[in-house]
Image (cartoon, helix red, strand yellow):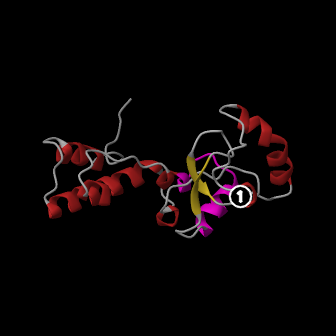
Amino acid sequence: MAAFALGAAAVQIGTAYLHCPEAQISPIYRQALKDVKDDETAITNVFTGRPARGIVNRLMRDLGPMCDVAPEFPLAAAAVAPLRAKSEMAGSADFTPLWSGQAARLNRSLPAAELTRQLAEETLEKLRFLEIMSSPDVLAQAAALATVGSRRVSR
C-alpha cells in the first residue's frame, strides 16, 4: 500500500505466498520466514551472483551481503552448492538462500487463492479510502482479483 501512496502504478508480492500450503519450500525455510525480524533481511549477491533480498544467515554475515569476490551469475549457486547441501542435511540454513521481502513476518498461512482474495480486498478498500488511482483501471483490476477463489469452475 505504501508503494501506491508514493505513486507506484503497480507492486509485486512474492514473499506473502511462501507460507501458503502450495509453496514448495523446505521446513527450514518456513521456520526462517516465521522467525525473521524486519531488520534481518539484506540485499545479497553471494548465492546467485546477482542482487536479491534474503534473510541474513551465516554465509551473508561471514562474506558480507554484497561480496566483490562472489562468482558471477550463474556460477555462484554452484560454488555454494556443496556447503548448502551439507548444511541442509544437518538441519541448518547457514548456506541456504532464504529469499524474502522486508515484511516476511506479515505472511499468513492461507491457501494461495484465499490469500490473493484477501490481499485484493484489503488493497481495494485502502485504495478507495485514500482515493489513490495511478491509472483508471487500478480499482477494476483490484476488484477482479478480489473475486479470485470465490468462483467455482465447472468442468
Q: Secondary structure at mark 1?
A: helix
Q: Is residue 9 left or right of residue 74?
A: left
Q: Residue at x 73, y 43 (%)?
A: 69
Q: Amino acid at mark 1?
A: Ile
Q: Position of residue 122 (x, y in %)?
A: 29, 60
Q: Which residue is mark 1?
A: 28
Q: Is 152 left, or right, of 33 in this rendering?
A: left
Quarter of the picture containing the C terminus is: top left
Q: Nearer the viewer, residue 112 or 133?
A: 133
The image position of residue 140, as x and y in percent, is: 18, 44
Q: Is residue 92 left or right of residue 153?
A: right
Q: Is residue 72 above or below residue 8?
A: above
Q: Is 21 within the magenta?
A: yes
Q: Residue at x 68, y 56 (%)?
A: 64
**x, y percentage for residue 133?**
16, 50
Instruction: Report the side of 96 relative to 91 (left or right).
Output: left
Query: Measured from the top left, where is residue 38 in percent x and y?
Result: 52, 68
State the residue at coordinates (68%, 46%). 46
